[in-house]
Image (cartoon, rainbow, N blue to C red):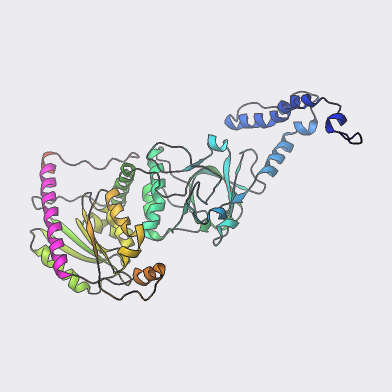
Amino acid sequence: MNPNSTSLEQKSPIPKCSSFLFLPILLAPLILLQLQSLNPSLPISFCPSPSFSSHLCNQSTLLSKLRHSITFLPLKDLRFSHNPMAGNTWFMSSLPDSPDSVGEPYYIHVPSTSTNNRLLCISASDPHDGSRNSYALAYPEALPYNSTFLPGFTFVSDTFYDYNNLWHGLAAILPFARWHAANGCASPERWFLFHWGEVRKGMGKWVRTLAEVSTGGKVRVVEGGEAAGVVCFEEAVVARRNDVGMSNERKEEVYDLMRSRARIYCGLERKGGGNLVEIRMTLLFRVGSRSFKNETAVAGVFQRECERVEGCRVRLVRSSNLTFCEQVTLMSETDILISPHGAQMTNMIFMDKNSSVMEFFPKGWLELAGGGQYVYRWLADWAGMRHQGQWRDSNGESCPFDDKDQCFTFYKDGTIGHDEVFFSHWAAQVLQETKVRKLKDASKRKKQPSKPARDACH
């Protein structure tokens, strides 16, 4: 050792090992503060002895230190840009999902033991760059300076898609509807909406109404001045993966709840049909992208097949000009839904269970669309419907590009032709199957009247 140098051990009048004796004294205030957060009525003293240093005995000083130690992190973690849904996802990437029962959606529940009973605080005013918005955890006794405490229960949603499209909005609502039903029917005081960590000010009218119906209260979105500063939530449930983690059984339960509540909300009652087994067929048309090239010809095929079956009737409808309740009413009076692939098909959740769905695609989707082309097949399965297959148009222009992404863009919003022979045969099969099923259902109802879907909240 260099004789001209002086070690810390030599310089200090306290033996090396004795420094550890002070650790409990230094940590005592933090431990006591944590105990008080678990039991606010617990009497607390920050001074282990009268001789303890006064600056450590000052509670306001300690709370100030805690406030200054709060670390805000980006809501959108750009390190996960290449795979946004990996790990904890790029939204609040430092927070793991709360462990819940198998088959339940993934949530972050704050406060909880996993957050050391700290509250969630968010500073988010940027609607364009989620990495400029931020979040932190803070003890309730030491919230950030100039923050606003929001009492009650808050739903915080981040979606990879949006809150306007019916299908995308439904996927975002689903975990919150499940939380509501499974946790004492708790309804939120407010919603805080994000897309890729970017603030969103609201939901589409259909999505908003379904959210209110499904979670038991008005949707009030955190926005404007309230969202501009730091807000801290008394209690928050964060969902950032949509329905990931949910079993098919849980999904079906939520769709049953949505169907039942939407019908009650819209004032619908099941009307008895006497001995007549009515088969109600609805052609739900689109305007523009993925519309039929010749709606009249397509309608004619299904009308002719319907006329061959006693008790069958057809409706030709466009959903774009219907209110939420008009769409619920239409679907509650539909046994067979015939429609091009598109968000309007989300309304199938309002049909009676075991109803049928027939889906149509323009050219190019099978080869280029990936898994997204099957979402309504999956939805039919989750909601207890019968997806009767997909017809894909093989005629039309060829893609002029070599790149697959460019080709999908070229085909994505194309129009759909028709095959009269195939459509006739397909319609006849589905009509016959529906007739047999409804006759069996009518016979069962005579012996044992059906019970309404159970709603845990009523």
Which residue is painted at 39% across and 70% down in the image? 409
> Residue pushed farthest right?
4
Given residues 87 and 307, the one toward you in this image is: 87
Q: Relative to 418, does residue 79 appear above or below in the rendering? A: above
Stretch of the chain drawn in magenta: 418-444
Residue 215 seen by the camera:
no
Residue at (43%, 37%) from the top-left corner?
100
Q: Name the image quarter holding residue 279.
A: bottom left
Instruction: Using residue 274 as the reference point, say whether residue 12 is left or right of it.
Output: right
Which quarter shows the N terminus? top right
Residue 144 lies, in percent from the top left, at 65, 45
Whether residue 186 is visible: yes
Q: Residue at x 29, y 72 (%)?
A: 415
Give the image quarter of residue 397. Answer: bottom left
Q: Residue at x 15, y 70 (%)?
A: 420
State the image coordinates of residue 146 (x, y, percent, origin top left). 66, 49
Left or right, residue 317 beside residue 81: left
The C terminus sits in image quarter: top left
In the orientation shown, which residue stands out farthest toward the front? 1
